[in-house]
Image: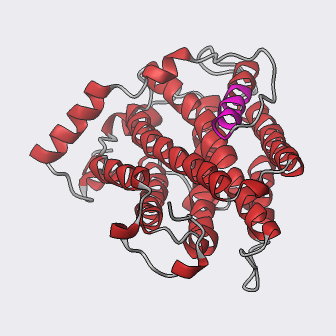
Amino acid sequence: MAKILDKNKEGVSQLIQSQNTWAIDLWRKGCANHWMPQEVDMSTDIKQWKNNGFITEDEKLLVKRTLGLFAMGESMVSNSIDTVEYRYITDGACRQYLLRKNFEESLHNWTVSVCCEAYNLNVDEVAEAYRNISTIKNKNKFVSDRLSKFTPDFNIDTKEGKQSFLKNMVTFYLVMEGTWFFSNFALIMSLGRQNKLTGLYDQINYTLRDESIHVEFGVNVINKIKEDYPSLWTKALQEELIDIITEGVEIEIEYAKEILPNGILGVTADMLVDYIKFLANTRVASVGLPDIYESVKNPFPWLSEAQDATGIAAFFERREKNYQNAGMLDDYLDEF
């Protein structure tokens, strides 16, 4: 089977030559899941946000921090695709999926804009969170430091080059998308379970579904590279990868304590810390690494049921019958 990192096929994206059918399956799944942020009904959110006291100040802080994180995170993920993944992954099916994934990142960034408009937030303040909010700034530095290694003269053909590529994949797929994003999904969806900001809940639910496929893709690529180049998977590399994930978890724990000073709707910072550690163990297991944390369980078992199949099906049925254009949000805003 052809290797994913094959310099002899650099720049070639021929699906018919790819034997990695799992990547095409993920591409098809992503296409079937297509959604647009402006199609989500935000009218209830607008009313609730303007209703003094209905959404508490702690809950508003959570929303602002989450939007700030996504504004930074989705942009950095796109940077990784553009400067690293699409540049060095030569398998046609994988490259096809990366094109789909990059488009989805643009949708997730658009979600931030739609929510900022609905809640009348300062867009510049949200977009600049990675500069001004220390816990998000730390996340930005964590991922930027990894990306900075991929200079124009970077050589993927060496053992060290391929190991650096694996470190970048772990940083973005297991830490950022697989842990940081999912811990924030849990918090926003806990609001939705209490019928608060149900529009944002839907936006996050659809984003979560996209991100689940993103993580699956990243895990498959990491495992395929391990299979293609077994000599890369040294004990030293595995220890480095564990260190990267551990550092990412520590950064996320700091963030969790900052956004949950008093807890929200029964969700405490300690519960979120347990969930972050649970996610980390799940991610390392997916690529054959040992658990990092002992005796941690998922404190949010309801989250596995959050992607309600009926609700998602109803959304796509509605969009077929009544496609709502980008002016929909303006109509709602004009009422208030």
Is 279 colored magenta in this rendering? yes
Q: Is residue 278 above or below residue 23?
A: above
Q: Is residue 72 above or below residue 158?
A: above
Residue 54 can be seen, yes or no: no
Residue at coordinates 30% horizontally, 27% vertically from top-left?
Answer: 309
Residue 296 in which image quadrant: top right
**Considering the image in quadrants, where does the C terminus appear?**
top left
Q: Position of residue 302 (x, y in %)?
A: 50, 16
Figure label count: 0
Q: Position of residue 292 (x, y in %)?
A: 81, 30
Residue at coordinates 63% horizontally, 36% vertically from top-left?
Answer: 286
Residue at coordinates 49% horizontally, 67% vertically from top-left?
Answer: 91
Residue at coordinates 46% horizontally, 36% vertically from top-left?
Answer: 49
Residue sitting farthest toward the bottom = 153
Residue sitting farthest toward the front = 1
Residue 40 in which image quadrant: top left
Q: Is residue 138 left or right of residue 311?
A: right
Range covered by the magenta-colored residues: 276-287
Q: Position of residue 294 (x, y in %)?
A: 81, 19
Q: Which is nearer the eye, 43 or 13?
A: 13
Q: Position of residue 256 (x, y in %)?
A: 74, 33
Residue 287 can be seen, yes or no: yes
Give the colouring mode of the picture: secondary structure
Q: Is residue 225 above or below residue 191?
A: below
Q: Which is nearer the eye, 59 or 19?
A: 19
Is 76 colored magenta in this rendering? no
Q: Main secondary structure of the magenta part?
A: helix
